[in-house]
Image (cartoon, grey):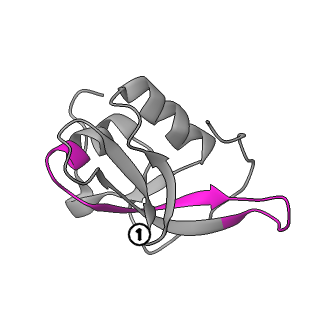
Amino acid sequence: MTPKKQNHTFTHNLFNLSTDYKLLWELIFQGHRIPAWIVYSDEYEKPIWDLVEVKKAYLTDDRYAIGVRGISYDGWKTNSFDDFETTCKAYSLHFINPLQITNEKN
């Protein structure tokens, strides 16, 4: 199930954050584990930014995982970049761009 799109602002000054989901996809399937923030909400609280890890799913070569210890936000069920991108956008995912890498394809 894809989460409902949240409108939420995120102020940051100390991190080089990115929403280049194609780059993130490439990084995780190169074996990198990338820290990111997502907008989390439930029926009880206002939306908050939650820190997560984006990585290749355990014991797979073609699935991803977005979550933290004990909480999985998405992944495992698909190896489709389109599904991954839709999920990232719905969660307003912002990831820390390691070493300020840029996607040369853009």
Magenta-colored span: 27-48
Residue at 73% from the left image edge and 59% from the top image edge: 41
Is 4 placed above or below 72 here? above
Residue at 39% from the left image edge and 39% from the top image edge: 21
Taking the view exactly as shown, the residue that stands out farthest to the right is: 44
Taking the view exactly as shown, the residue that stands out farthest to the left is: 30
> Which quadrant of the structure image shows residue 3?
top right
Q: How many marks?
A: 1
Is 13 placed above or below 73 here? below
Q: Residues within 10 Å of mark 1 (few under 14, many from 20)?
A: few
Q: Secondary structure at mark 1?
A: loop
Residue highlighted by disc 1: 15
Residue at 43% from the left image edge and 72% from the top image edge: 69
Residue 10 in percent (x, y) is at 63, 62
* Viewport quadrant of the N terminus: top right
Residue 11 showing in the rendered view: no
Is residue 32 found inside the magenta-colored segment of the image? yes
Is 60 placed above or below 69 here? above
Viewer-side residue, 46 vs 10: 46
Is 93 placed above or below 45 here? above
Is residue 55 found inside the magenta-colored segment of the image? no
Residue 61 in percent (x, y) is at 17, 40
Q: As drawn, is 10 to the left or to the right of 14? A: right
Residue 40 in percent (x, y) is at 66, 60
Q: As drawn, is 89 to the left or to the right of 103? A: right
Residue type, numbered disc 1: Phe
> Which quadrant of the structure image shows residue 68?
bottom left
Viewer-side residue, 99 vs 42: 42
Q: As drawn, is 46 to the left or to the right of 52? A: right
Residue 88 in percent (x, y) is at 51, 42
Residue 87 showing in the rendered view: yes
